Amino acid sequence: MGAGIVVGTGFGEALLEQGPDAFLLLTADGTIAFVNSAAERLFGFPREELLGVDHAVLLTEEGSGGFLRVFGRLGRKSRAGSRPFAAVGRRRDGTELPVEITCSLVTVDAGTAMAVAVRDADHRNDPDAGRRLAVSLLDATLETTSDGIVVVSSEGQITGINDQYLKMWGMPPELIAAEDPTALVRFIADQLTDPDYFLQKVSALYADTVMQSHDVLEFADGRTVELHSRPQKVADRIVGRIWNFRDITSRRRAQDQARRAMEELAEQAGKLKELAFQDPLTGLANRMLFNERAAAALLTPDPVHVLLLDLDDFKEVNDVLGHHAGDEMLVEISRRLQNCVGPHGTVARLGGDEFVVLLVGCRDADGVAQRVVSTLNAPVSIEGTLMRPGLSLGVASRDAGTETSSELLRQADLAMYAAKEAGKNCYVHFRPEMLAALLERTQLTAGLRRAVELGQIMVHYQPVISSDRLDVVQFEALARWEWDGELIPPDDFIETAERSGLIREIGAEVLRRSCTELAPWLAEDPFRSVAVNVSGVQLQHRDFAERVLDIAAWSGVDPHQLVLEVTESVFFDAHSHVIGQLETLREAGIRVALDDFGTGYSSLGRLQDLPVDVVKVDKSFVSMLHTGTEKLPILTSMIHMAHSLGLKVTAEGIETPAQARYLMDHGCDALQGFLFSRPEPAAARERAVRNSVAAIAALEGVPLPG
C-alpha cells in the first residue's frame, strides 16, 4: 500500500470518492497522494498501485511535461493555470485515452499540493478530437526535437517550452514556473561572452514583431549555440514569437578543425609538391619531374637531348667507406652536375647512382657531355679519403621518330652501356644499330634459355696429344648450341650465357655429359683426363666446388682425371672466395689449368702464387710460328718458366706440323689444335682419335699400321 496524504473525512471525502470525474492529489514533486474510485476505473489501476508513485505512470510521455508549467502558473494565480487542457492518458494495460485535465492548488497537512481532475474526453466531437490530436502531435514534436524551443505570446506569457530547452540551459524549475521571459533572457545573457549584443538583439526583435533573425551565440563555457527567432502566426495574425536554440558546438569544432587542417594543407601544399618532385638526398628533380619536363619539351620544336650517366664501381665506395660516405659523394656529384648544366637544363637523380640531364634548346650537347665527363672525373675528398669518381655517359637526341620521354631515356640508356663497353669515363651517342643489337641480344638470350630448359646444349670433344706418349691423353669438352639449324660458335653465346646467369646451368650440363660420355674411356687408363672450361661467373657461387665433386662422384669419374680450365680474370679479386674454392678442388685431386695464358695481366712471376697445375699457351703465340725456324724468346721463356714452377704446359691452336715440331722440341708437354682434329660430337669421338693418331704418325714419319 503506497503512502498517501489524509485529505479529510465526512462529506468532502465521500463527495470526492463518489464523484463522476477521476480525482488525484499530487505533491510538489509530482507524486500521487490520493486517488478516487473514478480514477481507478478510468485508468484500470487499483488504488494501492498508484499511491506513492510518480503521476507520469498515468500519462503518455508527451503529456507529462505540462504539469510543471501548470504548477508554476497556479502558484502565481495565473488564469492560464486554471484552464482545462487536453492530454493523453495511459491505462494499466498500456492503451491510451484522450483526457481533459483541470488543476488547482490545495493546502494539506504536508504543505501545498495540486488537485487534479481528469475527465474522459472520448465524448468530444470530431473537430475537437482533431484539434486535440494536432495539439498532441505538436507537443510530441516539441519534445522529440534536439533543438531547445520556447514560445512567448505577444502578452509576454510563455505558451510553449520543451525539455531540451531546460537541459540546454540548465534552468531551475522555479525559473520556468515563474513564466517571466525577461528572467529567461537575463539567465541566458549571463552565460554569453557578449551579453550586450544578445540583449540588444532581443530588444530589436520585440520592437519589430515581424522581424526574423539568425544569430550565433558564443558561451563562456566554450559552447556555441545557433539562435533562430521568428514571429508566431495564427491565421496571418502575429500572436507571439518562437525562439529556437540549436547547440552547434560539435559542428563548429569540426568546422574549425577542418578549416585549420585546410590552412595547414594550403601552407604545406608547396612543400608537398616539392617533395613529390624532388630527390630527398640531393635536392635534384626526381624521375617524376624529369618525365614531366621531358614530355613537355617534346611538344616544342626545340632540340631535346638526354644525357644519362651512372657512376662506375660506386658500390665500392659504400662497401669500403660506408653508405654515409656514398651519400656524400652523390651530393657532390649532383652539385657538379648542376654547375655543368646551368639553369637552362634539368638535372635529375633517377635512383641509386644514376643521374639524367635534360637539355632543351641546347645547340652544343657534346660540349655539355664533355664538360660533365671531365668535371665528374675530378678527384673528390670523402671523409679524408681522396677518390676519383668514374662514370659512363650516354647521349640521346630527339629525332623525327622520337615520341615519348621514356623512348628517349631508353636510347640514352643503350648509349650509356656502349660507353661502359668503350672503356668508361667517356660519352657515346645513341645510334639506331644499338637498338638492333639489343633486340638481337634479347632474342639470343631467350633462345639460349629455351635451349637450356630443353637440354639442347651439346658437347663436342677436341683431343689433346701428349708429347711424350704421342697419344691422345685428354679431351677438352666444349659447349655447342644448335639454334634454328645453325651451330652457334661459343664466342657468340658464352658472353650472353654469363650476362644472363645461364652459364651456371650450361657449365654443370657440360661437366655432367662429359663425365658420363667419357667415363668408359677414362676408366681404361688413369693417365687420361677430361678438361672442362669454367667461367668466372660459375666460380662466384659458393657451392661451385661442392657441385663439381658431386658430379664426379655421381658419374664415377676419379677427380684426378678432371681438369678445370679458367682464365686469368678469375684471379683479379684477391679477396674473393674463388681461390679458396679452387684450392678445395685441388686438394680433392682435380687439376686447374690456366687458359689463354699470356693474353691477360698476370706476370710470369705471379704464377707461383696461383692455384694452377697447367698453363695453356694462347694460340696467338703459336700463330707466330710459320717455318719452325723462328726465334721466339717470349714463347720459350713461358714454357721454361712454367716448368721451373712445376707446371705442365699445353699449346693450343696448332695447325701445322712445323708448329707442332717446334713446340715439342722446346719441351711443350701437350699439343692441341686442328692439325690433329677439330672438336667432334661424342658419336664421332673415335674418328677424332684416328685423325689425331694419323697426324702424330705423319709428324714422326711413322707409317700407320695396315
Image (spheres, rainbow, N blue to C red):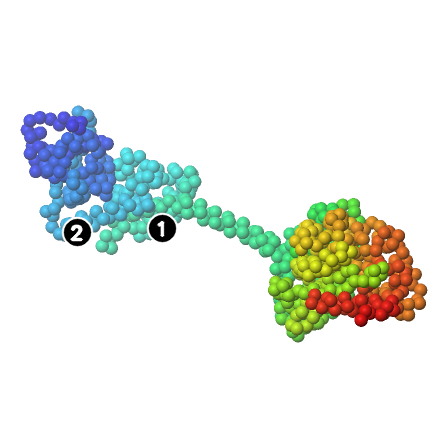
Sequence-first disc among 2 and 1? 2
- Could you tell me which quadrant the C terminus lies in? bottom right
- The answer to which of 545 and 199 lies nearer the viewer is 545
Residue 614 showing in the rendered view: yes
Residue 364 image position (x, y, % from top left) = 75, 68
Task: Give the residue drawn at x 69%, y 67%.
Answer: 683
Mark-to-mark CA distance, 2 and 1 = 33 Å
**Position of 619 compared to 184: left or right?**
right
**Position of 139 compared to 363: left or right?**
left
Circle 2 Cα neighbour tier, 10 Å, few/some/many (<14 / 14–19 / ≥20): few
Task: Give the residue drawn at x 90%, y 58%.
Answer: 637
Q: Among all residues in the image, which is located at the extreme top?
A: 109
SS type, badge 2: helix
| Dot 1 amino acid type | Ser
Circle 1 Cα neighbour tier, 10 Å, few/some/many (<14 / 14–19 / ≥20): some
Q: What residue is shown with label 2?
A: 130
In contact (CB < 8 Å): disc 2 and disc 1: no
Residue 225 image position (x, y, % from top left) = 38, 44
Task: Give the residue drawn at x 58%, y 53%.
Answer: 272
Q: What residue is shown with label 1?
A: 213
Residue 559 image position (x, y, % from top left) = 73, 52
Residue 243 image position (x, y, % from top left) = 32, 46
| Dot 2 amino acid type | Gly
- The answer to which of 207 and 334 lies nearer the viewer is 334
